[in-house]
Amino acid sequence: MKKNFQLLFRLLLPVLVMLGGLTVPLSLSAAPQADAIYINGNIYTVNESFSKASSIVVRDGKILYVGDDAAAQKNYKSDSPVVDLEGKTVIPGLIESHMHYLMLGQTLDRIDIFQKPKAEILDKVKAEADKLPDGEWIVSMGWNNVLWNEDYPTKEELDAVAPNNPVSLARVDGHSSWFNSLALQLAGIDENTPNPQGGEILKKPNGEVWGILTDTAADLVESKIPDDASEARKLHRFTLADQSVISYGITTLVDAGAANESIKILKSAYEEGTLKVRAYEMLSEGEDIDYINDGNEPVRDLYNGKLSVAAVKLVSDGSLGSRSAWLLQDYSDRAGHVGNGRWDDGQMYRIVKRVAERGFQIGTHAIGDAAVRQVIDVQKKVIDELGLTDHRFRIEHFQIVDAADIPRAIEYGFIPSMETVHATSDMNMAEDRVGSVRIQSSYAWRTILENQGIIANGSDAPVELVNPYHGFYAAVTRQDRDGQPPEGWYPNQALTREEALRSFTIWGAYAAFAEENRGSLEAGKYADFTVLDRDIMTCPAAEIKDISVLKTVIGGETVYESGN
């Protein structure tokens, strides 16, 4: 009888300890084996009660126990030395809910024009042209004319520094591009070329092409750019992006629009262990057709939870900075112009139904209030017809929204996938674009939460810097990184620090159907966590943007350590 009791106790002991952080005498059984024991931490678990702990025990890439130091050391053993966190703050591995994986790697691998003065950009283009053979393309992304206090740049400015090389420079938002004359000629663009649906060829007052094309119009030129990267070069770019995000404590990213070729490269890379961050891939609209025709279904957590391909990304309009976001009424600073919608209702319905019938999640880029309304109205029809009860369709960006559509979106189960850093980047032009009335329900994070919604937070990198602490800082202060405006931009819409941390962790996990295995530090979930150089929950607000990562752990493996 006693032997049977001892056997039962040995079998149940790890479960009891894991469930309750239970401290029990170990005279009847040896302590469960762990791969690593971390103690003396200031750990924010981001569980339902937002409790704190001081220790984490890890085994086989997952969390075995979260609780106090005494129980961790008494109830578990490890062949590795106990890791003293020295009182440092630990948070769940951050979830970057909207970025562009390969595009970030491309920007790290090309000339840097991100938010640079125009004169500096022109100098960089000239230097590149001087060393390239005639006819080779110069491609980059990141200019922002709002910072120059002027309207759009012209093709003639690029002609002066690169007359013999076609040039394509995407604006920081990725929804308009600046081309020189040679690039336009190669695409056959002139004053007689009509605007395609969903884009615009900007013209000078005399009808001459300006050199700025938005969205689908820019695609007419960009489609002529030869692929500048072999499969090996693309893997190199993914690696650059991987190294960048893990250095900021990001352990999962949502890749908002990927080609089938990228999926094949990623599968190989994750199978071989080349890349470390967990990736949730959204296929670009159109790419899903080939993916499905090849017999593929949505898949999650391949390669020990490193890769999921389970969503499709649609783009319904452009951006506010390029005046191509689709509005219900005219732009306040451009009479007669409402931006550019990409789809009519029938087109969107057919795409969404095709994708949803195969079980894929939908994430739709919608920045303007007309685009947001179309997404709600059209996709709700598909949701009802298919009887979807847990669809978690996402509206990516959700920036300019009619006040009546915020509760509608949440009622119908849409998740706002937003970038809080966009508000403080856009505040220098947003109200000019939409006026003082529409701005009240724009970038409206507090209103979303008051309507029982959640926000999945990200950066949209490389549109913004991938640094998540810039987004966290913007979320709680509504200020730019110079501390302006002093009281915050519409501070009534700010998030608390707890809400901001949830938006970068457990809410992001929920938005990717991954809350069961990541997003908080709880037993049974992946051992994904980030060690910071200061307490993100209590440090002065002005310091949040300056936080540095000391260590990033993914699946129990230390994948980044500062100074190493």
Image (cartoon, rainbow, N blue to C red):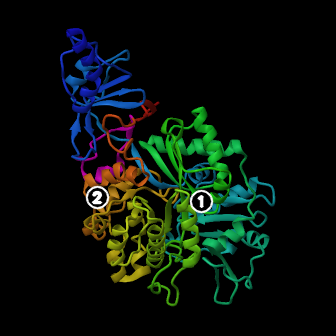
- Does the magenta run of residues contain 419? no
Q: What quarter of the picture does the N terminus occupy?
A: top left
Query: Left or right: 501 with respect to 379?
Result: left
Q: Residue at x 38, y 61 (%)?
A: 420
Name the residue beneath numbered marker 2: 476
**Residue 541 lies in the magenta stretch:** yes
> Is the Cβ of the residue at disc 2 closer than 8 Å to that at disc 1?
no
* Displayed quadrant of residue 68: top left
Q: Magenta part of the protein: which range? A: 527-549
Quadrant position of residue 192: bottom right
Above or below for 108 versus 455: above
Residue depth check, mark 2 versus mark 1: number of the one nearer the observer:
1
Gap in angstroms between the C-alphas marked 2 and 1: 32 Å
For residue 123, above or below residue 338: above
> Quick check: can you spot residue 450?
yes
| The disc label shown at residue 321, or none | none
Q: Which residue is mark 1?
A: 284
* Residue 84 pos. (x, y %): 29, 25
First in residue order: circle 2 vs circle 1: 1
Residue 151 locus on image (x, y percent): 54, 77
Residue 75 point in image, percent of width and height: 25, 20
In the depicted view, which residue is nearer to us: 163 or 314?
314
Residue 93 in which image quadrant: top left
Which structural element holds mark 1?
A: strand
